[in-house]
Amino acid sequence: MIEEQQNNPLHGLKLEVLLTELIDFYGWEILGTAMRFHCFNTNPTLEGCVKFFRKTEWAREKLENFYLSRFKRMPRASEAEFSLPPRKRTFAVGILPREPMVLTVESIELSQAKAASAHKERSRGPRRR
């Protein structure tokens, strides 16, 4: 029985290729700011990053989410698929990757500050006594 190929840009994509695409497009500084992984900031090498992401599943999933959402600009996962790892998710037939999102260190820092502020507001919320 032949299994139908997934509609997912990660299908069949090796970690080295994914990292090379991201590094070539964004560079180490933007990846370090956006992802906040030590391997992108201190003496970054492709080999060191591959080793880290192979050993650290949660970090690899965060990297794959970044690849899908920022680099390939695919739609957010549905509620049903949100808990699945990025490589297990599928997209509707006909949904194709778009041009990568242009990011700067400043735009990333602004986005992170807004997210932190929103989180602080939500956690402050009405307190019950």
Image (cartoon, grey):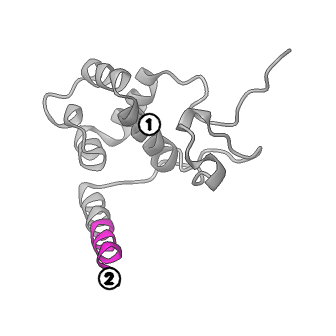
Give the residue displayed 29% in from the left and 39% down from the top. Answer: 27
Q: Amino acid at mark 1?
A: Glu
Q: Amino acid at mark 2?
A: Arg
Q: Which residue is rendered at x = 40% and y = 41% of the image?
A: 62
Instruction: Residue 48 in the image: state x and y as whole percent.
Output: 25, 21
Q: How many C-alpha atoms fall within 10 Å of the one at disc 2: few (<14), some, or many (≥20)? A: few
6 lies left or right of 34: right
Name above or below for residue 84 compared with residue 101. Answer: above
Magenta range: 114-129
Looking at the rendering, which quadrant does residue 24 occupy? top left
Q: Is residue 24 magenta?
A: no
Q: Who is closer to the viewer here, 19 or 112?
A: 112
Give the number of the disc on residue 127: 2
Using a 10 Å C-alpha cutoff, classify the residue at mark 1 as few (fewer than 14 neighbours), some (14 to 19) or many (20 or more): some
Q: Is residue 86 visible?
A: yes
Compare marks 2 and 1 and give the one earlier in the sequence.
1
Residue wearing tag 1: 61
The residue most toward the right is: 1
Taking the magenta stretch, the answer to whether it contains residue 117 is yes
Residue 80 versus residue 17: which sits nearer the camera? 80
- Whether residue 78 is visible, yes or no, is no
